[in-house]
């Protein structure tokens, strides 16, 4: 309507700049409303979760006043704390190993031409799209097989433990590290390595003085991704952990099955805070690049 | 020459798949010389330089630096340094750290490094920029950092791959002079790659002209300009006129060609030619003579009737394009030694004229 009158009185092209300046039209209003709804849909449950981790209500479903009780209880809960330590340990070790392996693999794939490189190239991305349940079953079956083999060869009996979980997490996070590190290797100017060699640097110095500092943001980005993925992994952790070695997501699930308490809200809030910190960190590192 | 050669290439070939980027190149670059590799894009200049630096290895042939065979020596152990066309400065290091890189690789003491970096930055007039990052510098400043970073290692040979290519014309001219005087001062052998013939002529002691992987001619700027040995070099360096024909007579260092329309023209032969061979007479625009038809000197044996077509006055010269009987055009440049505003003193379009190619100024060249 507004447009129709304006085009009638003014030259036609005047309508366009008005749009470009962001003046709202009906279509724009509808779009805005949709965007708001989507954001509500995404973040309202999370906001409520965070809010109800501070409520006095013991079922955590109504707001009856502020308390930090649930957090204190949480820290007193040995089972949950044990699971938290396990989770952090698994995340840390699997991240370190996956980052080192992933970086090496990314370098090999990016730098060298070898027979079968294309298939290796595709295969490394596959774990990203394979359903996690399939990965989990495969890893479980494989660990059983490996344990049998080890018993046969050495007589030693192994059980599923945090180590098996770590191996499982490495198995899926390596691919993510490779993807991220390769991107920064692609942007890396190989002539800088030639310049370093020209100035007398051997391969060791070339890597540590030139290549590594320049792809470090990519490596850190990959590591943070691996860490986050490991933190909240459920299926593989459930399948590969042994008796008495529970991990946080699994533990939370077990508790929720019995009853949703504000304690769960509290632990979820803490995990959320950690994840957000990691994401912000990785973004700021990557922006520095 | 009793001087040793800084760099020798012996029959060097470099193949990438089917194409020979460098095709049987032999060069002897003397110690302390400013040597240029000049040629059109894709002729193999960079590849040649990269083989001297050690980034590529020859498919066959050998490279010798100060008497040492380089076949098995990796880049970081060669006594050469490179100034890359893109400069390849380390973006994560400051200017001072960039310049210090080579000395750090040699594990020199910290205070020696600091002192020499200061000195090197002074030498390229960048003292105030030590703590900047490369991306905070202009192109010309980056170029000077690259130069300082290479020179601080006191290499036996400095390789420069179109180091001025990315700069604008004015800065380029300035740096040409700066680079040349720097080379004189430090006395290091420079191997300089360029596709700009004027740059090569200005700066070099000697030039190797390359085309399609081959070295066509090596010589001083004057030799290359005044006595090109083949048609390509004459064409590539400076401006020239060609008149095609067939060799009908040859002497010790001169020959005569006959054009299809029966003109007989004579010129020097920098390289021997055979009778019957197709050849061109090459004559530079400033070396031909344009005379009025009545001029006494127009009775010359090598006079060709012509008609003035285009006259461009460009200050120092007047450039005249004439058309010959067979409809080919020919350029003549006359120096404006006369100080006059009188337009009649210059050639007018449409005027008849006589073109003379003095045999001492003309060359008979083959492909
Ligand atoms: N790594 C490579 N693989 C395949 N072909 C190459 C490679 N490097 C160079 N060539 C080819 O070799 C030839 C010579 O290349 P080179 O870079 O030496 O030319 P140049 O004289 O330096 O040209 P420019 O003036 O454009 O830099 C070109 O045809 C180029 O395509
Ligand atoms: Mg080149």
Image: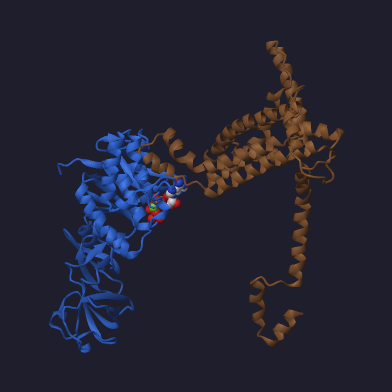
In the rendered structure, the answer to whether residue A170 lies left or right of residue B318 reads right
Image quarter of residue A82: top right
Q: Name the spot of residue B332 as percent of width and height, x first.
A: 25, 75
Q: Is residue B8 visible?
A: no
Where is B308 relative to A288, above or below?
below
Residue at 65% in and 76% down: A18
Residue at 27% in and 34% down: B68
Chain letter, brown: A
Image quarter of residue B313: bottom left
Residue at 34% in and 55% down: B141
Residue at 59% in and 47% down: A283
Where is B76 relative to A150, above or below?
below
* Front-most of residues A194 and B359: A194
Q: Name the spot of residue A110 as percent of width and height, x first.
A: 55, 41
Q: Is residue A31 visible?
A: yes
Q: Name the spot of residue A171 as percent of width and height, x first.
A: 67, 32
In the rendered structure, the answer to whether residue A148 lies left or right of residue B124 reads right
Q: Name the spot of residue B290 as percent of width and height, x first.
A: 21, 79
Which hue is chain B drawn in?
Answer: blue
Quadrant into which the N terminus of chain A falls: bottom right
Rendering colour mode = by chain
Image quarter of residue A172: top right
Q: Extreme top residue here?
A: A155
């Amino acid at each position: 309507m507004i447009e129709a009158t304006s085009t009638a009185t003014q030259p036609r092209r005047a309508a366009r700049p008005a749009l470009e300046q962001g003046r709202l039209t009906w279509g724009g209003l509808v779009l805005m409303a949709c965007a708001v709804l989507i954001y509500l849909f995404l973040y309202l449950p999370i906001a409520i979760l965070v809010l109800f981790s501070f409520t006095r209500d013991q079922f955590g479903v109504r707001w009856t006043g502020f308390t930090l009780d649930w957090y204190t209880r949480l820290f007193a809960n040995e089972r949950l704390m044990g699971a938290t330590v396990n989770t952090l340990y698994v995340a840390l070790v699997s991240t370190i190993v996956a980052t080192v392996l992933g970086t090496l693999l990314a370098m090999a794939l990016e730098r060298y031409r070898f027979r079968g490189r294309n298939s290796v190239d595709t295969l490394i991305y596959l774990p990203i799209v394979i359903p996690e349940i399939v990965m989990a079953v495969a890893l479980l079956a494989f660990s059983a097989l490996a344990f049998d083999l080890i018993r046969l060869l050495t007589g030693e009996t192994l059980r599923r433990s945090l180590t098996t979980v770590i191996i499982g997490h490495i198995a899926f996070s390596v691919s993510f590290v490779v993807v991220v590190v390769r991107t920064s290797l692609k942007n890396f100017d190989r002539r800088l390595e030639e310049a370093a060699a020209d100035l007398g640097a051997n391969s060791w110095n070339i890597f540590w003085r030139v290549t590594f500092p320049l792809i470090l943001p990519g490596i850190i980005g990959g590591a943070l991704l691996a860490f986050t993925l490991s933190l909240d992994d459920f299926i593989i952790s459930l399948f590969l952990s042994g008796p008495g070695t529970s991990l946080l997501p699994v533990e939370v699930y077990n508790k929720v099955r019995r009853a949703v308490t504000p304690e769960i809200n509290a632990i979820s809030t803490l995990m959320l805070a950690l994840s957000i910190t990691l994401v912000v960190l990785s973004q700021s590192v990557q922006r520095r690049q | 020459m009793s001087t040793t050669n800084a760099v020798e290439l012996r029959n060097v070939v470099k193949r990438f798949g089917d194409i020979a980027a460098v095709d049987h190149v032999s060069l002897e670059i003397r110690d302390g010389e400013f040597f240029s590799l000049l040629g059109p894009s894709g002729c193999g200049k960079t590849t040649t330089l990269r083989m001297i630096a050690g980034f590529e290895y020859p498919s066959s042939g050998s490279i010798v630096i100060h008497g040492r065979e380089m076949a098995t020596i990796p880049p970081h152990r060669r006594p050469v340094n490179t100034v890359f066309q893109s400069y390849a400065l380390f973006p994560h290091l400051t200017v001072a750290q960039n310049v210090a890189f080579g000395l750090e690789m040699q594990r020199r003491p910290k205070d020696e490094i600091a002192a020499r970096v200061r000195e090197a930055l002074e030498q390229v007039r960048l003292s105030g920029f030590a703590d900047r990052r490369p991306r905070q510098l202009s192109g010309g400043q980056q170029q000077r950092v690259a130069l300082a970073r290479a020179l601080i290692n006191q290499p036996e040979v400095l390789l420069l791959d179109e180091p001025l290519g990315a700069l604008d014309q004015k800065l380029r001219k300035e740096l040409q002079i700066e680079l040349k005087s720097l080379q004189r001062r430090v006395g290091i052998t420079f191997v300089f790659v360029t596709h700009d013939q004027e740059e090569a002529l200005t700066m070099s002691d000697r030039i190797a002209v390359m085309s399609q992987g081959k070295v066509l001619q090596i010589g001083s700027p004057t030799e290359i300009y005044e006595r090109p040995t083949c048609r390509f070099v004459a064409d590539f360096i400076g401006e020239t006129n060609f008149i095609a024909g067939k060799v009908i007579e040859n002497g010790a260092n001169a020959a005569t060609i006959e054009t299809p329309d029966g003109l007989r023209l004579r010129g020097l032969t920098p390289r021997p030619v055979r009778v019957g061979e197709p050849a061109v007479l090459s004559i530079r625009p400033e070396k031909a003579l344009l005379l009025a038809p009545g001029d006494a000197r127009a009775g010359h044996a090598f006079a060709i009737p012509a008609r003035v077509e285009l006259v461009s006055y460009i200050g120092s010269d007047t450039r005249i394009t004439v058309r010959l009987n067979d409809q080919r055009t020919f350029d003549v440049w006359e120096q404006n030694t006369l100080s006059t505003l009188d337009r009649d003193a210059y050639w007018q379009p449409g005027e008849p004229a006589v073109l003379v190619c003095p045999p001492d100024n003309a060359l008979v060249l083959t492909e």
